[in-house]
Amino acid sequence: MRPTFSDITIVIALELIGAILLRFFLLADDWRIVGGILLLFCAGFAVMQFRSDWESRIGDAFNRGTRLAVGLAILLVLLFPLALNGNTYALHLLIVSQLYAVLAIALNFQLGSANIPNFATGASYGIGAYVSALLAIHFNVNFWLALPAAAVAATAFGFLLGVPSMRTRESYLALVTIAFGVVIHQLLNNFDWTGGPNGLVGIPAPSLFGHSFASPIVIGGIKLPSQANFYYLSAVLVGIAIISAQRLHGSRIGLAWNALRADELAARCQGINVIWYKVLAFAVDAFLAAFAGTIYAFYISFISPDNFTFLVSVTIMTMVIVGGMDNIFGVIVGAFLLTMLPEKLRAFSDYRILFFGIVVILFLMIRPEGLFPQRLRRYGGSE
Amino acid sequence: MSGHAVLRGEGLTIRFGGLVAMDGVDFVLQAGEILGVIGPNGAGKSTLFNLITGLYQPTAGKVFLNDRPLNGLPAHRIVQMGISRTFQSSRLFTDLSVLDNVIIGMHCRTQSGVFDAMLRPSKARGELRQAAAKAGELLRSVSAGLYDQRGRAASELAQADRRRLEIARALAAEPKVLLLDEPSSGMDDRDTDALIADVRAIIARRPELSIMIIEHDMRLVAELPHRVMVIEYGRKIAEGSFADIRNMPRVQEAYLGRKATAHA
Amino acid sequence: MAAELMQQGLNWLTLGCIYALIAVGFSLLFGVLKVIHFSHGDVSLVAPFVALAALQGWSASASGMSAIGLLVACAIAVVATGILGVVLDWLVIRRFRDAPAMMALVATVALGIALRESVGHIFPNGHNPQPFPRLIDANFNVTEGFNLPAFNVLVIGSSIAVVVLLFLLLQHTPLGVRIRAVSQDREAARLMAISPSSVFRATFFITSAIGGLGGLFYASYAGVTRFDFGIQAGLIGFSAAVVGGLGSMPGAIIGSLLIAGLDTIVQATLPDGASYRLVFAFLLVILVLVFRPAGLFGSVAVEKV
Ligand SMILES: Nc1ncnc2c1ncn2[C@@H]1O[C@H](COP(=O)(O)OP(=O)(O)O)[C@@H](O)[C@H]1O
Ligand SMILES: [Mg+2]
């Protein structure tokens, strides 16, 4: 179906408003501006809560105008750094948010699609980071080769992590994943060849066609700080994560995950090999997390075990629950919100972890479906 | 009825701790036949289905589908080989749409794996779209009312429609044998009549399909099955046409009691 | 050599008892709730902070620290921890009784984090380690080269006493009967006019108080307490309960002794052993779960269809 004129207006207006708000949020120094933008955000939600017809109108507009929405979004992502007045801290926040968005999308395969508890996403993230960093430091492997190598290593770990899920469920499985996460963290902390608690330093910056990611981008007289390299790199990764998530969600695999989420036993009786699909969810999670880990390592050029603790896993879980389980857009919003909020509300940064804990409990009690609830699938516009 | 045994059980026995829930039950299901399974609550009827579908592993005894032994196969393989079922208390995927429930029922008749989904999305999507079209047709053939509600979440369905959807989902796997566990539970008389008509319509389109049906509603038992077997305390105590078994004193004692005599 | 072995044996038993006090709670709570209460370790480790606060209050009024002061502080801590368990159930956990297990699970993990952080923020300077006194400082000199500290005797003796009392309570009192009834079949218990929520309250109080005692011993054994001890203690206690088989009391105790044994051996034989203790405990858990998914003493229940 072709988008109508009002569809086009809605899509353009919402994306522009979103981008502008994000810009002001990122550049705001004053907590009152931050609070004001948050209030606007909440007000938007309150309106949606009461006017569900508006919500479905917006949904329809984006459904019909998908191409326009995607094209405009790509354009905005490309141009966004230009609007930041060269503020490197804002760029840094964006990079970290995007990496967390990837991690949250990764975890969403399990937590959101298949309802499997996994407290080890932080560990897969760490394995990705460490494998690629070690390859780069000791074997001079360049970033573009380290990336797939790390992904393979982490996926193997994901399969390993998935093995106990063949025979255990729920609380037991949660314990196993926590255990794996803690074991990885302690091993990283104790081994000599991982640098122990000091971690690894001096991870070289990647380069592409002779352009080092440590140097600024200069195009036609416009100069962007060196962070912009990693901003675009992580944006590409978010794009890949979204595409993978959508392809899996819109396939027989996504359906099988959803089936075992709703009723594992009934899923078995529909011919679904639940063991395979569970292990698969672990592997996919680890695969994507490793990409994020690699980019993180090469971006910061220094990693230590404390970047990959149990709390990191819980943070990622918070993002999925707050954003909305099994809603890719929601999960991304959750990641951005929960990465930037604690940074923007510096005065409260000591309370960050407490805040995460309470937010999770409150969401599970009051709005377990998250900010953006999952949506039913539609096939070929037949409805 | 074409008269060869599709499904066969030999000496099926299962213990839960001290309880012998099924004790040496033999049965045969012919191609195209409808076999009724009746018996008091807790007799072991659902346990029989669970043994056939691989949810429970028998302590002793064997199940054969077309003379191939099923023992030890996981539940999902048994579905693939052609045995589908419904549950006594319906177990739909409530947070998915009606159509998705049926498409999931086709899981073992579709192919795409992870690599198709990630790298050849048009193939994976195409397959799913085809499945959706087929699922729509199937829903329409089971019940027009259900078809109209195909975009809604399964949790929003009325009780009778849930049971219909569960049957449609089971049929989506293109089974040779269909096991229905108390399909009329929670239905009033009108819904039950509709159910009888639905099942008739289903077999009219699929002459080779064999059905085992656990039921308490004696009207349905009198109308649908060609043959009925009676289970009590995990044992088969009688087998034959409804007209024959309902006059057996042992069966009346065990199960039928007042309710059936009133209906008869 | 013999003295060394005896010393290690004593360490093993002491650690095993401390873990068991926490593990028993995990097991009993799982029995009635049917979902793991992941924050039980954090609840238990609130006790040392309560005791410290009470001690500070005491030494402000009376002069100096006395044995009685310590005893009273510990008693207050145990009761307060019991009450904390009931309050947390009322505030949070009861809202997830009928929710999918996954949600209760994640909620209690988050609850543990919130609790830990609250302790860190509320207790003055709470994010730093706080020295925690030995509950008794005497020594029995048994033979040459082997000292039997009164503290270890206290831990082992009171753990055995608590476990025996708990066993008697479960087997021979009306409350125990109700607790067992609810853990076997909640609906049937309700039909027999047993109110599950009162049973939940009682169970939370008992298990949290016992866990609190374990928490006091844990801190006293280590000589310090930290706001984030809860996660370690909780994971060890939970692992012990899982290794033994959730829901089984003897299982929880044997699981605790196994994990404590592994812990002792690793610390005694490996250089740097202390930093690997969780690694080995968890490897044991993973192995047990892969080969015996319901733990050593649990039996796999087949879901009724
Ligand atoms: N998974 C199980 N664990 C323990 N007992 C079971 C299990 N499944 C069935 N039973 C017992 O087996 C007996 C038969 O149950 P069932 O087959 O459900 O009876 P019905 O004939 O009403 O369908 C009952 O006593 C039931 O409690
Ligand atoms: Mg039954």
Image (cartoon, coloured by chain):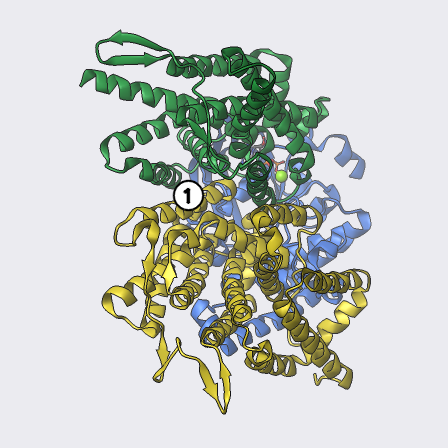
Chain colours: A yellow, B blue, C green
**Residue B66 quadrant:** bottom left
Q: Is residue A156 left or right of residue A114?
A: left
Q: Quadrant of ligand 1?
A: top right
- Image coordinates for residue B64, horizontal then vertical, percent: 44, 48
Q: Amino acid at mark 1?
A: Ala
Q: Is residue C22 left or right of residue A43?
A: left
Q: Residue at x 44, y 65 (%)?
A: A292
Mark 1, other Cα within 10 Å: few <14 / some 14–19 / many ≥20? many
- Image coordinates for residue B105, horizontal then vertical, percent: 57, 60
Name above or below for residue A375 compared with residue A145: above
Q: Secondary structure at mark 1?
A: helix
Question: Is residue A358 at all visible to an observer of this figure?
Answer: yes
Q: Residue at x 46, y 86 (%)?
A: A218
The quadrant in which the N terminus of chain A is found is: bottom right
Front-most of residues C278 and A221: A221
Q: Is residue A67 left or right of residue C268?
A: right
Whether disc 1's CB lies below 8 Å from ligand 1 is answered no
Question: Is residue B72 at all visible to an observer of this figure?
Answer: no
- Image coordinates for residue A316, horizontal then vertical, percent: 53, 55
Q: Which residue is mark 1?
A: A179
Front-most of residues C150 and B88: C150
Q: Chain of mark 1?
A: A
**Residue B141 quadrant:** bottom right
Front-most of residues B51 and A277: A277
Name above or below for residue B145 compared with residue C163: below
Q: Residue furthest front?
A: C63
Total number of numbered discs in the rendering: 1
The quadrant in which the C terminus of chain A is found is: bottom right
- Image coordinates for residue A353, horizontal then vertical, percent: 56, 48
